[in-house]
Image (cartoon, rainbow, N blue to C red):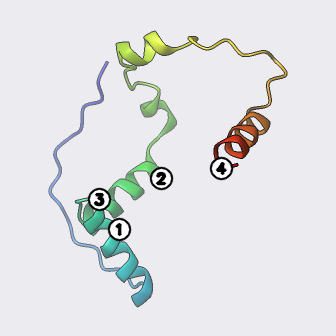
Amino acid sequence: MFIRKEVVMDKKLTVSLSKDVIERAKEYARDHKTSLSKMIEAYFDSLTRENAETDEIEISPLVKSLSGVVDLPADYDYKKARTEHLKRKYA
């Protein structure tokens, strides 16, 4: 099942932010080839989305096929394994 979005006309919103935050946000948006408006809309959308709506998101066949591929022991410490890996990598 896919989530159907209703088409709604855009409205303007005025916010006050520090100059430093605005400059960093503009740079981030430019680096990610998006606009500040789209970033803010996505952020507010993720904050206000109801849990029931996110339960309806379809899991792709690829993700389903990858579920359960790795079988780790119950006492596996991924943080320790990562630390050991990085020690070997940068030794």
**Mark 3 or 2, closer to the camera:** 3
Crowdedness near tag 3: few (<14), some (14–19) or many (≥20) residues, C-alpha within 10 Å:
few
Q: Residue at x 58, y 11 (%)?
A: 68
- In terms of sequence position, does the residue under pointer 4 or pointer 3 come before the other? 3
How far apart are the alpha carbons under marks 2 and 4?
A: 39 Å
**Amino acid type, mark 2:** Leu
Disc 3: which residue: 32
Crowdedness near tag 2: few (<14), some (14–19) or many (≥20) residues, C-alpha within 10 Å:
few
Helix, strand or loop for disc 4:
loop
Measured as percent of width and height from the top left, residue 32 is found at: 29, 59
- In terms of sequence position, does the residue under pointer 2 or pointer 4 come before the other? 2
**Amino acid type, mark 4:** Tyr
Marks 3 and 1 in Cβ contact (< 8 Å): yes
Marks 4 and 1 in Cβ contact (< 8 Å): no
Determine which quarter of the picture holds residue 60.
top left
**On screen, residue 15 above or below 29:** below
**Amino acid type, mark 1:** Tyr
**Amino acid type, mark 3:** His
Measured as percent of width and height from the top left, residue 89 is found at: 64, 43
Disc 4: which residue: 90
